Amino acid sequence: MSQIFKLYRLQQIDSQLDQARSRLSELVRLLENDSDLRQAQENFDRQEKVVRDLEKQLRLLEHNVEQQTSKIQECETELYSGRIKNPKRLKELEDEVKALKRHLQLLEERQLESMLTLEEETQVLHDFQHHLNSIKQNVYQRNSRYLGEKTELEKEIQRLENERALAVSSLASEFYARYLAIREAKKGIAVCRVQDRSCTACGTTLTGGLIQESRLPDRLTYCPSCGRILYGG
């Protein structure tokens, strides 16, 4: 098997490796990209705090209403007990009961408003919870596909690396060194096939002499335009 064919085969392996590694890097990035999930979780957590604060506020209002109701009952019990004979004291108690009832009405209005607000915000929380669950399900399904593809790619990369090691071991060191230098300089493509009398990398039309040279088994022939190694087949 000629050295130039081995170089061409190495180029094919390296191109496949480049593509597989690029996709693997993309999969890792996709697996780490959980911005949608994080945003949904943040929205839910923030709304959950709103609801918890409203619940706390409502419990406090309920407690205040209970206390106010108890005060009114105590005052009314004293007012109608018949024990108080002093008209002035009776008038003071009547006024106090009226004031307590007015404040109770205000507290109950606040309590009702708080209940309505809590109901609305709880619905928003349920909506966020539904959205979060949907995002989690989508991320799980998506990541399951990505992980499956990642596993297969890792196996393919390992196979190609083993094949590459065998290909390199059969190459002359000077050929391999030249290949690496051109590959680094030419964005990964060091060897290109001659097809339709042209360089398949840059499209330059080749002379008959260059085409003949590119078919020699153990001689490096370069494209006069892009400088890549030509493989005539």
Image: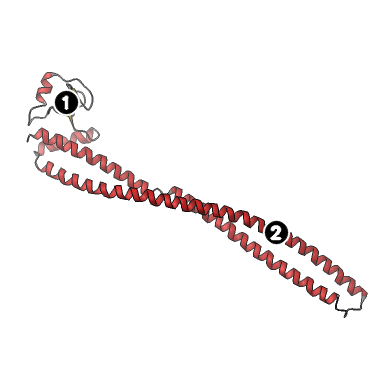
What whole-number distance in Å separates the C-alpha atoms at marks 1 and 2? 84 Å
Q: Position of residue 85 (x, y in %)?
A: 91, 78
Q: Secondary structure at mark 2?
A: helix
Residue at (18, 22) in percent of width and height: 196
Question: On the rendered structure, is 21 left or right of 59?
Answer: left
Q: Is residue 60 above or below residue 121?
A: below
Question: On the rendered structure, is 105 left or right of 33?
Answer: right
Quarter in which the N terminus is drawn? top left
Pick the residue in front: 125 or 214. 125
Q: Position of residue 111 (x, y in %)?
A: 70, 61
Q: Amino acid at mark 2?
A: Leu
Q: Is residue 200 above or below residue 172?
A: above
Graded by Cα atoms within 10 Å as few (under 14), some (14 to 19) or many (20 or more), the crowding at tag 2 reads some
Q: Secondary structure at mark 1?
A: strand
Residue 194 — which label?
1
Residue beneath label 2, please? 112
Graded by Cα atoms within 10 Å as few (under 14), some (14 to 19) or many (20 or more), the crowding at tag 1 reads many
Residue at (16, 38) in percent of width and height: 10
Q: Is residue 110 above or below residue 24?
A: below
Quarter in which the C terminus is drawn? top left
Residue 36 — which label?
none
Q: Position of residue 3 (x, y in %)?
A: 9, 35
Q: Amino acid at mark 1?
A: Val
User: Which of marks 2 and 1 precedes in the sequence?
Assistant: 2
For discs 1 and 2, the disc positioned in front in the rendered view = 2
Residue 180: in sight, yes or no?
A: no
Location of residue 164 by image quarter: top left
In this figure, what is the number of numbered marks? 2
Location of residue 219 by image quarter: top left
